[in-house]
Image (tube, grey):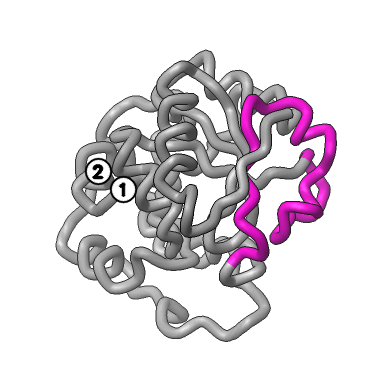
Amino acid sequence: MTVLKINEDDFDAAVDIAAALLKNGGTMVYPTDTVYGIGADAASPEAVGKIRAIKGIGDKKPMSVMVSDLNMIDYFCETGVWEDIILRKYLPGPYTFILKKARDIPASDTGTLGVRIPDSQFCQALCMKFGRPIVTTSANPTAQAPPTRFEDVDKRVLGAVDLSIDGGQTKYGAASTVIDLVERRMLRQNDREWIGLVDLPER
């Protein structure tokens, strides 16, 4: 198991190594702003299949992706004025937004896609360097609590990926709030208070 620890001295090297791994179809454990995730090229059926095997989930269960910026969201998803206002206001941040897909992507076999821009310098730099969406699903076997510290990541998960990145404690220490902008409803809200997006307007 290869482990990289992020610090100021090797930040750029960690980004370069992780991006190269993803381009070669590899899998990794990495810190987001919310929890530790398992990542791979969201546009590669083979890489997505590896993550499904690690997580123990079926082919039909959709997985969310993280992207570099709003332009990448616009490329892969359908958005209108209202969606753009919400996305610009709350991203980057500890939110996952469900949108209609504009293009097929192996990470989700449904008509929608969960997208994130984490409030994380590492995640944003990695997404920019890689240039494509990256799977962002919590680094835990199904039914276990998502880890917010590297030392809490399940050893079986660490042993199954090609690279693990230790970024210490995550910024928010809880899973992202999930908001469906297609059905306009909250799917998951964290215990802490979140500003806004409580009353979503009806269509």
> Of residues 159 and 47, which is closer to you in this image?
159
Residue 54 percent coordinates (x, y): 72, 28
Asked if residue 154 is among those painted magenta in the image, a careful observer would answer: yes
Residue range highlighted in magenta:
141-170
Mark nearest the camera among 2 and 1 is: 1
Residue 77 percent coordinates (x, y): 28, 42
Label 1: state its secondary structure: loop
> Of residues 51 and 4, which is closer to you in this image?
4
In the rendered image, is residue 180 in sight? no
Tag 1: amino acid: Ser
Residue 48 percent coordinates (x, y): 54, 24
> Which residue sits at x=39%, y=24%?
43
**Label 2 belongs to which residue?**
72
Q: Quadrant of the N terminus?
A: top right
Asked if residue 195 is among those painted magenta in the image, a careful observer would answer: no
Q: Is disc 1 surrounded by few (<14), some (14 to 19) or many (20+) residues within 10 Å?
A: many
Label 2: state its secondary structure: helix
Residue 202 percent coordinates (x, y): 34, 70
Residue 83 as seen in the image, left or right of residue 177: left
Residue 156 as seen in the image, left or right of residue 65: right
In the rendered image, is residue 172 in sight? yes
Residue 38 as seen in the image, left or right of residue 150: left
Does residue 88 lie above or below 97 as drawn?
below
Query: Tag on residue 68?
Result: 1
Q: Are marks 2 and 1 in contact (CB under 8 Å)?
A: yes
